[in-house]
Amino acid sequence: MADLLLALDVKGKAEAVRVAAACAGELDAIKIGYPLVLSTGLGIVKDLAKSEIPIIADFKVADIPNTNSLICEEVFGAGCAGIITHAFCGSDSLAACVDASHDHGGVCFVVCEMSHPGALDFLSGENAERMARMAKAAGADGIIAPATRPERTATLRGIIGSSMKIYSPGVGAQGAQPEDVKKYVDGIIVGRAIYEAADPKAAAHEFRVRAR
Ligand code: XMP
């Protein structure tokens, strides 16, 4: 049984609030990222707070430890409940994100293997497994692993165990189905297949039911 996270990659406050309101009651969390935040500012977090579900900032943080901590301060200060970071900058950069998240009462998820085809160049295989081990050692709350490669997500689940969560993008527009991955993960992340649907609430409802 997996939760449903909406990847709200729309532009502008009006569209973001419209889609979030339309999907009320069908979502377990909203994931925001650069497309929305660059078009609205971080104030969008307060605008989405009416949804009364966690807002997770997918900023794929990838910098030196001090800069990572400063980014986390802004994200959690704006009201986010979680942040998504990269791990490839190394254990000190990752620790800065995890520690800053926990200092602010938030959660930190770590990108291990990405869902798109180009992930096979670097963000997959042994690199992904090393990053999963690093995420576990750092005390991260969970990892991001691909619905498009369920066998890889199963492998990463074996590395992190059951005490950490996995959120999984790739369902919908990237071709994966909820049924491919739901037994390995705690949440599926769906973007375009919901926010571009003629009826986003109905689309969200269907994904939520299929993820259960
Ligand atoms: P779609 O429209 O493809 O949106 O359903 C997917 C959302 O998830 C993000 N994404 C990822 N984030 N690791 C991540 O941390 C990944 O492998 C990955 N693949 C997709 C994407 O940015 C969008 O918000």
Image (tube, helix red, strand yellow):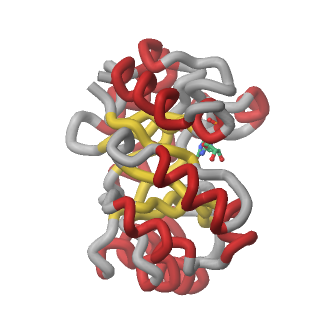
**Residue 111 at x, y = what percent?**
54, 48
Ligand 1 quarter of the rendering: top right
68 w.r.t. 159: above or below: below
Image quarter for residue 64? bottom right
Say which quadrant the N terminus sits in: top left
Give the left or right position of residue 147, taking residue 60 as reference. left
Give the left or right position of residue 124, taking residue 26 as reference. right
**Residue 103 at x, y = what percent?**
30, 80
96 w.r.t. 89: above or below: below
Let me know if residue 2 appears in the view.
yes
93 w.r.t. 181: above or below: below
Closer-to-camera residue (152/125): 152
**Residue 179 at x, y = what percent?**
42, 13
Say which quadrant the C terminus sits in: top left
Give the left or right position of residue 184, taking residue 109 as reference. left
Residue at 39 percent of width and 51 percent of height = 29
Closer-to-camera residue (70/125): 70
Image quarter for residue 190? top right
Residue at 48 percent of width and 28 percent of height = 202
Residue at 73 percent of width and 60 percent of height = 11
Closer-to-camera residue (28/63): 28
